[in-house]
Image (spheres, rainbow, N blue to C red):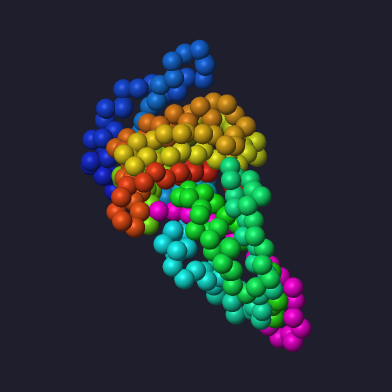
Amino acid sequence: MKKSIIITCIVIAAISFFGFNYLSQNKSDEKALNIASIEVTTEAKKSDADFIYGIGPRFGPIKKEIIHNDLSITHFLDDMQQDRITSIESIELIVIENDVESNKRIKAKSSEFNEAQINLLKSINYSDGFKLRIDYKEKHFGSTELFDAYSTPHHTVVPETQAEYIYGKSALINFFVENTKAATAQIPEDKLKPAKLYFTVTKEGSIENVNLDRSPGFPEIDDLMTLLISETPGGWIPASNAKGDNVDQELVVSFGLMGC
């Protein structure tokens, strides 16, 4: 039997919720939430956690202070890519708005960002995203021939200190897993679609702007996930900028079948 560490303060925070009933599938009934105790396990069961596979910024996080301080294209290439690249042919910067590539884009035939691209990057707000298209020549092991290749990293601009659930990510995932087991038990895995639930942790630590961007294909799951993110026991620690001031941050819960 796997060992579990029950966080006493978490249980205390959740006790007031124990009296609620499970979310009714009858939409005419009042929806209520049965919040399971939050448990941090030393070894999570993969099969249990598959339904919830991501909590954080929409894309790979990059801090605003990095963008404002001597930004280099090497920040967006891993070590293996840098070892293979012989020359960078061009860089295109594309701002992503509402999860869609916008017309705010600048392409330059250069090996580093130009001034216009840097200024555009600096204008991107917290929780907004961008995509790069980096075209380059690369060499392969054992070959003298050069090959055309490209990379398309996606990033979300995040505060210097990101918002976090007061009891930690593991406890939050467990909270979702325990409270969705009954609702997902009878749903065939191949019927679930990748889904994304957006929400904002305000500078006061409250949850606002809960928005289901993609549905897993089952309305009862949509309702349950929306309710759960609004009722997380214990609260949130807000994000803060480089000056230490609290700021709003948008986060995303990815669930259902894994997708992009």
User: In the image, residue 96 lies at what x, y percent?
Assistant: 59, 49
Quarter-of-image position of residue 30? top left
Residue 202 in the image: above or below residue 132: above
Give left or right: position of 158 versus 151.
Answer: left
The residue lying at 26 percent from left, 30 percent from top is: 15
Residue 168 in the image: above or below residue 224: below
The residue lying at 35 percent from left, 22 percent from top is: 20
Q: Viewer-proximal residue, 217 or 66?
A: 66
Q: Viewer-proximal residue, 156 or 40?
A: 156
Read off the magenta span. Answer: 141-159
Q: Is residue 51 visible?
A: no
Q: Viewer-proximal residue, 139 or 37?
A: 139
Q: Is residue 28 visible?
A: yes
User: In the image, residue 44 lies at what x, y percent?
Assistant: 42, 50
Total number of numbered labels?
0
Quarter-of-image position of residue 189? top right
Q: Residue furthest top?
A: 28
Magenta stretch encompasses residue 230: no
Q: Viewer-proximal residue, 143 or 119?
A: 119
User: In the image, residue 223 lies at what x, y percent?
Assistant: 51, 27
User: In the image, residue 208 lies at what x, y percent?
Assistant: 42, 34
Give left or right: position of 212 versus 168.
Answer: right
The residue lying at 59 percent from left, 37 percent from top is: 214
The residue lying at 58 percent from left, 63 percent from top is: 116
